[in-house]
Amino acid sequence: MAITVLARLRLLSVLVGLSSCSSLYFPPPPQAPLLTQKGEFSGGIHTNFSQNTALQGAYALGDHIGVQGSASFLRSDKKQSFFGSKNNRKYEEHDFGELGLGYFTRLRDERVLEFYGGYGFGHGKRTERSEGVTKTFDGNLSKYYLQANFSKKESKTWHFFDRDWPVSYGMALRASYVQLHDFTIDGKPQEMEDNIFLEPISFTRITVLGPIQFQMISGSNFGLRSRKYLKAANSVFQLGIIVNLGGQAGPR
C-alpha cells in the first residue's frame, strides 16, 4: 500500500512538473498564399482544437514580390484533474503577429515556389491554479523566420454529392528563431530564453465555390534547443478557409 501511494505521488509530481513546463509560444500556422502575379490577394482564417485562431493575408506587390501578414489569438481555460481533484485549472492567453516579404514564381509545369522572410512579435501568459496555489508565467515574444512554400497544384478531382471537387496539395517549411524576454514568474524577473524551431507541414485544399477553398494543414514542430518555457508542440493541425482573388488562370 505504501509503495502504491509513493508511486502515485511520484506520478503526480511528474504531471505537475510537465504542466508547469508548458510553452508560452503558440505560433500561427505557416502561411502559403501561392501568389502568381501582381495584384493577387490571398486571405484565410484557421483554427485548431486548442482554440488557436489565426487570420492571414498576402498581396502580390509585383509579378514576383509579395508581402504577407498574420495575427493569431489564443484563449484557453482548462480543468486539470489529478487523482480525483477538480480544483486544478490552467488558463492560457497568447497574442502574436507576423509580417513578411518574399519572392514567388510560377514554374513551367504550373507549380508555384515561394520564399518569405519576416519578423513576428507577441505576448504569452499562463496562469496555473492547483489546490488553492496560483502561479503566473508572463512574457513577451519576438521572432525572425524564413519560409519556403511549394505547391503541387491541382493533382486530382474528388467526386461526391453529385459534383466534382478540385483538390490541390502543397508543402512548406518554416525555420524560426524565437526569444522569450521580459519574462516573469509571479512578477519576479527570470532569465530570457530562446529557441530555434523547424516546422515542416503539408496542406490539402479543396475548392468549395469559386475562389473559396477549404484547407487542412498537418505537420510537426521541432525545437532544436532544450528549453523549459519556450518549447515546441509535437504536431501541427489546423482547419481553415482560403480565398484567392486576382491570380492567374489555371489549376490552383
Image (cartoon, grey):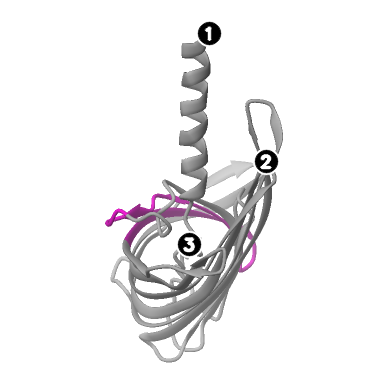
Relative to 106, is 125 above or below? above
Viewer-side label of 2, 3: 2
- Tell me the residue that label 1 is attached to: 1
Q: Residue 220 colored magenta? A: yes
The residue stretch that appears in magenta:
197-226
Query: Disc 2 on helix, strand or loop?
Result: loop
- Tell me the residue that label 2 is attached to: 131
Residue 202, horizontal then vertical, whole percent: 41, 53
Residue 189, horizontal then vertical, whole percent: 46, 71
Q: What residue type is labelled 3?
A: Tyr
Q: Residue at x 53, y 8 (%)?
A: 1
Q: Which of marks 2 and 3 is nearer the N terminus?
A: 3
- Tell me the residue that label 3 is attached to: 25
Query: Disc 3 on helix, strand or loop?
Result: loop
Q: Please, what is the dominant secondary structure of the magenta stretch?
A: strand
Horizontally, residue 52 falls left or right of residue 154, namely: right
Q: Count how many numbered circles sit on residues in the image.
A: 3
- Badge 2 crowding class, 10 Å Cα cut-off, few under 14, some 14 to 19, many 20 or more, is few
Q: Which of marks 1 and 3 is nearer the N terminus?
A: 1
Q: Residue at x 30, y 71 (%)?
A: 107
Q: Which of 145 and 225 is in front in this view?
A: 225
